Amino acid sequence: MISADQQPDLRRKLRRSKSRARLRGLLLVAPALLLLMVAFVAPIGGMLFNAVANPEFRSAMPRLADYVREWDGQELPGEEGYRLLAEEIGRAYSDKTLPGAAMRLNYEQSGLRSLFMRAGRRADRLEAPYRRSFLELDKDWGSISVWQAMQAASAPFTARYLLQAVDREITWDGEIRLVEPEKRVFVDRFEATFWISFVVTSLCALIGYPMAYAIAAAPPRRARLMLVLLLLPFWTSLLVRTAAWVVLLQRDGIINDALIWIGVVDQPVQLIFNRLGVYIAMTHILLPFMALPLYSVMKGISPNHMRAAASLGAGPISAFWTVYFPQTVPGLGAGCLLVYVLAIGFYITPALVGGSGDQMISYLIANFALGTANWSVASALAIVLLCCVAIFYPFFRRYVGIDRLRLG
Amino acid sequence: MRGEPSRETPLVAFRAVEKTYDGVVNVVERLDLEIERGEFLTLLGPSGSGKTTTLMMLAGFEAPTAGEILLNGRSLARTPPFRRNIGMVFQNYALFPHMTVGDNVAYPLRRRRFPRSEVDTRVRRALDMVRLGGLEQRFPGQLSGGQQQRVALARALVFEPDVVLMDEPLGALDKKLREDMQLEIRHLHQTLGMTVIYVTHDQAEALTMSDRIAVFSDGRIQQIGSPREVYERPVNAFVANFIGENNMLPGVIVTPAEPALSSEGAPQLCTVQLDDGPTVEALANGSRRVGERVAVSIRPERLELAHRPDRRNRIQGRLLEVIYFGDHARLRVRVGAIEVMVKARLDEWRHPECRGERVDLSWATDHGLVLEPAVDGGAAA
Ligand SMILES: Nc1ncnc2c1ncn2[C@@H]1O[C@H](COP(=O)(O)OP(=O)(O)OP(=O)(O)O)[C@@H](O)[C@H]1O
Ligand SMILES: [Mg+2]
């Protein structure tokens, strides 16, 4: 027995030994944590920032930005405002920051880019009275919406990109509404992305489950061979695999030839450059990510469980659903999560084997980031995508029990 | 315990059953075995002797390659495992890890579509029976090995199967727990009157628990009988060596038994000239020819250390070693070319150890058995 006055001492010892263990644990994961910081947290933080940052106008014309922030937004500014406008445009033009700001203003209202760039080129000819000068240059300078656009562009943060990513915009008086029908592109792509990912995940589960079962049940030698075959596609690049599907699925490809030869069809079927092609290619590419976690849990289920179930009176089907399947659910969940998340990020495959309506959101993100160099929209799309994916995690955790999964 | 227990038909009968996995060797060779209702039969044998295979054929997980198995007089050949109504306890319990203890035990009842209230009462009764009442909500992973074992037992008994098969159910438990569970299973068998076929390669377990023991070797039953018969009247050297400890003294028959003097089947007395000593008398099962090479089998605990001139069977040897076991001591004694093990009570052996000392050994005539000489020495348990 330990007397009461010895207890604090014991507790201190316990704490000390525990903290030592914790420190050791921390040291072990330090490299991984560092990598995570550099390769994951920092980029996501940057992305989040990019999606709401609004620096272009303010950095090009800081004094004007301060001025329009103060402006009440009701009436056109007076001569003072136009004088500041002339000075700032002139300076921004000469230190070459004007194009960025003009571009940014153009997002608020199309046409503003050329309006500002023209004024920049003629800035040396602008003189008092400035307001008259501007109006002579272009009568649009007398429109209050130009100043409102500048005010919107002068705030340190903006929600416009995030709203744009879901096909919404915010009006001057703070109302959020859908953009014009011809500009509604993103929601459609998001829906296609989630739907394609969902179908591909389901196909992978339907094909991967029996496949993993066959491998887990096979004698060791054959199981090893099957695993190698399963992993063989990883030895070639994604691009090559996708291209191979183009060769196989095209109008005069092997599959069509075979179908015609068997007599199932008499005209070549359109198997590629449509949704079907995307499903086929993506399911094939992602199948191992479903089969491997499933295989790993199935391998851990003792064959005696099925025998026990039979000896207790369960027929094969009943034994499967009551004993086998529930034990594979963590693997199935992990596989689905893996395939789903990977599928959402696909873009080369749909770009190569899909039609125009089968492009996924990642394609647009890449397009904005690399093509038009609009990092703000690209980031906003990525953030929305991330949020949509994150929604699924608690669901998986709750119903599938990823925590219970043991790999290997 | 059930209706219509006919006296003639045994509950389970193996008729000329054979099994081969690879088409080359028979893992089970022409097995003929009958198990009576309410019996506790143990299949005992060394590893690989076909015990599990025999159980698996009865449970329906392996098909015999020849012969047939009858349950209640009906052939099981076309009955799938889930319709056989045979309870089974696996070596590693095979509890379903995703179900609670209660659900595990309820599993066979639910598969048989018992009404819910019936399921509840039966589960409770079964768990109380194995002294696990109140643990229904736990998962198997939260139980100790012995508790898991009892859950598996409750699950195999709760639906009152015709036969309960147990394949080394205590193999994974430590010695103390094993002994407790042995008694517990034995008591359950006695109170419920169920039929049990029990597999083990632990001879002590077989001796303490069984009504009958079938000693397996190389797919054949070497001997089947009560624990006493198997231990005290082994029919051959394999059985004598496999069950308990045994000394084999090689020799030659001098006087065979006289068949005329003895009744049918009873052992007869013959005289054997030991290779390394005097002539002794021992019991023989069958008739032996003069000059036939045999071995006299004597259990270590039947050898007496005291110099007993009244005994007709006496040998002498030299002490090699004394091994202290707490409740007894074992003496390794060299007798001529062979070595003999003697189990001595501590009060019998009060001398301090003295290597090379001369030892007199004697035994009662009916404790020596004439067997054919062991070829390979047999497997000692
Ligand atoms: N599924 C199988 N396929 C091929 N051979 C098998 C199979 N199961 C068992 N055997 C072989 O059959 C023989 C008997 O095996 P069995 O499992 O019946 O022995 P056992 O008496 O239960 O042994 P143990 O005490 O080690 O459990 C062994 O030689 C074993 O290698
Ligand atoms: Mg076995």
Image (tube, coloured by chain):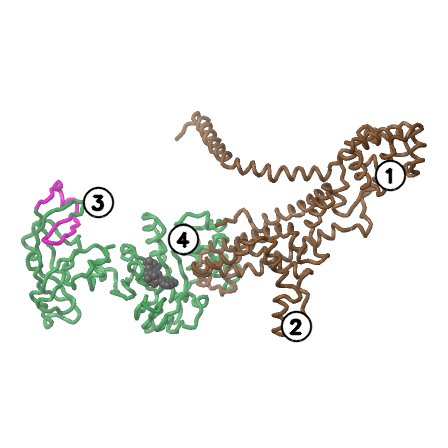
Chain colours: A brown, B green
Q: Amino acid at mark 1?
A: Leu
- Which residue has dot 1 on it? A115
**A202 relative to B20 in the view: left or right:** right
- Which residue has dot 4 on it? B150
The answer to whether A339 is drawn above or below residue A109 in the figure is below
Q: Is the C-beta separation of discs 1 and 4 under 8 Å?
A: no
Sequence order check: which comes first, mark 1 or mark 2? Answer: 1
Does mark 1 have its CB less than 8 Å from ligand 1?
Answer: no
Magenta span includes B283: no
Which image quarter: residue B167? bottom left
Chain of the residue under label 2: A
In the image, A143 versus A93, the foreground residue is A93
Tell me how far mark 1 sits from mark 2, CA to CA.
60 Å
- Which residue has dot 3 on it? B325
Q: Nearer the viewer, mark 1 or mark 4?
A: 1
Q: Residues within 10 Å of mark 1 (few under 14, many from 20)?
A: some
Magenta span of residues? B332-357
Chain of the residue under label 3: B
Tell me how far mark 1 sits from mark 4, CA to CA.
86 Å
- Label at residue B157: none
Tell me how far mark 3 sits from mark 2, CA to CA.
85 Å
